[in-house]
Image (tube, helix red, strand yellow):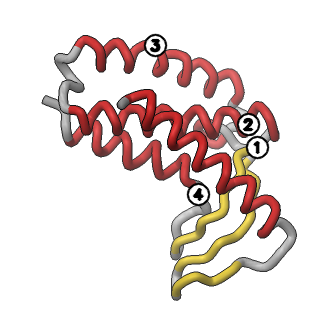
Amino acid sequence: MFLASAVAVIVVDQLTKMLASRLLAGRQPVRLWPHVHLCYARNAFGLGGIRGGGTASLVLWGVSVLVLPLAIWDGHVFSHPAARVAIGAALGGATSNLYDRWRRGAVIDFVKVGWWPVFNLADVGITAGAIAAIWFIR
């Protein structure tokens, strides 16, 4: 379940970024609801607002990929199935954004909600996955 959720987030995120790049780049934002817009943005900043963030991102991702699966398979901390799915979603989102930085030199963001910064589905996977994993810790 861990791997399936990670792969699902990666695939859906990359597909939506591809669509956003094709349909939204160079165009005005598209209003979906009063405070929700679709718009194309390239985020070249990394962890902590540092441009690129390649090495720091890669190290953090690598440590996460090594430590979190061990915690999941150990079964003491993330024993609830929902926690395992959530951790997979968070790592899938991180992997997808890291792939963007490596492939495009920037992460493609396309969802704007109110005053919140523009984000993508990988960001949702990271945030919701981390919150859900913590919620379901036993």
Give residue 63's position: percent from left, percent from top. 49, 16
Q: Secondary structure at mark 3?
A: helix
Q: How many marks?
A: 4
Q: Which mark is residue 101?
A: 2
Distance in Å between CA atoms under marks 1 and 2: 5 Å
The tag earlier along the polypeptide, 4 or 2, is 2
Q: Amino acid at mark 3?
A: Leu
Q: Which mark is residue 66?
A: 3
Distance in Å between CA atoms under marks 3 and 4: 26 Å
Q: Secondary structure at mark 2?
A: helix
The tag earlier along the polypeptide, 3 or 1, is 3
The tag earlier along the polypeptide, 3 or 4, is 3
Q: Are marks 1 and 2 in contact (CB under 8 Å)?
A: yes
Mark 1, Cα crowd under 10 Å, few <14 / some 14-19 / many 20+, is many
Q: Which mark is residue 70?
A: none
Q: Secondary structure at mark 4?
A: loop
Question: Badge 4 is on which residue?
Answer: 119
Residue 18 versus residue 67 in the image, above or below: below
Give residue 81's position: percent from left, percent from top. 23, 33
Mark 2, Cα crowd under 10 Å, few <14 / some 14-19 / many 20+, is many
Which residue is found at the position 43% from the left and 39% from the top?
89
Question: Badge 1 is on which residue?
Answer: 106
Q: Is residue 69 left or right of residue 137?
A: right
Distance in Å between CA atoms under marks 3 and 1: 25 Å
Distance in Å between CA atoms under marks 3 and 2: 21 Å
